[in-house]
Image (cartoon, helix red, strand yellow):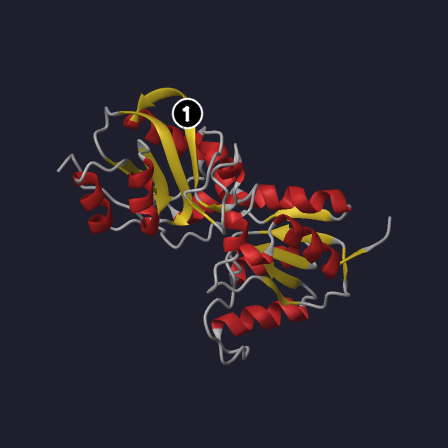
Amino acid sequence: MTTKTVGDIVAALEAAYPPELAESWDQVGLICGDPDEPVHKVAFALDCTMSVVERALEEGADMLVVHHPLLLRGVHSVAANTPKGKVVHTLIRGGCALFAAHTNADSARPGVNDKLAELVGIRPGRPIRPVGDVDVDTPGALERATGLGRVGTLPEPMTLREFTQRVADALPETVWGVRAAGDPEQMVRTVAVSSGSGDSFLDDARALGVDVYVTSDLRPPPVDEPLRAGGPAVIDTAHWASEFPWTQQAEGIVNPLGVETCIIPVRTDPWTVSAHPNQAK
């Protein structure tokens, strides 16, 4: 089999996660590396932290694919004495290219949100917020549309308490855990999901009339106001947990190319301790 290059891996990933689906503020694609360099092993992770890079190099990877771009905001220096610069220099010295698929992977079909929908037990249907124009008069067009978030239906209704536990059981464990807002005994069946930070879709979820909305990084006021106005129950997960399972999907895109692959299981969620009052006091 012909040796694959960084460019070959990029082409496969961009066919699955078209760059034009990325939000205007996003920075996706090849971050460092030579498209003509050969690739024998590709590693997958959610974030490009120093611990992830060190693990990828230990695994012998010559390309690292992540979800969150390393250089998302304006950067004026990648000097090795800066945190991100050190990561870049370590990658280059180790002969490891870096590629990011972010909001383009969120909106693609299948993408990050389809994986989250699958894990919580719904068949992913329409996006919460479609990308581009959708001919709603064409049967199934909205169901097949690309866009952020997914909406679907559970096979059988269950209580919010039961569904919250299902979500917790389905996602990787974190210190943050999973919490819900709403009546624990409320029956839920229609579900909207949005991987990562999704408070900007709370009004969309309410307008869609779903029973429960699953996302991450929620603050009390944006949750409380729609809930009091009759909006859906809300389940708040750790950002990392809602998106890390995507690495399996991305790995599946590259596997047919005949290169070795591995998933870096480093938990990059920032929270390390949680505590509750000692009831024995």
Whether residue 277 is visible here, answered yes or no, is yes
Residue in front for this viewpoint, 85 or 236: 236
Q: Residue furthest right?
A: 1
Residue in front for this viewpoint, 75 or 224: 224
Find residue 5 and report its horizontal and vertical position in percent: 77, 59
Q: Quadrant of residue 192?
A: top left
Find residue 118 and report its horizontal and vertical position in percent: 50, 33
185 with respect to 254 (left or right): left
247 with respect to 227 (left or right): right
Q: Which residue is mark 1?
A: 154
Give the residue displayed 60% in from the left and 73% down from the top: 89
84 with respect to 276 (left or right): right
36 with respect to 249 (left or right): right
Find residue 232 and report its horizontal and vertical position in percent: 27, 36
Task: Determine the secondary structure under disc 1.
Answer: strand
Find residue 155 and report its horizontal and vertical position in percent: 43, 21
Whether residue 217 is visible here, answered yes or no, is no
Give the residue displayed 48% in from the left and 63% down from the top: 24
Give the residue displayed 65% in from the left and 41% down from the top: 252
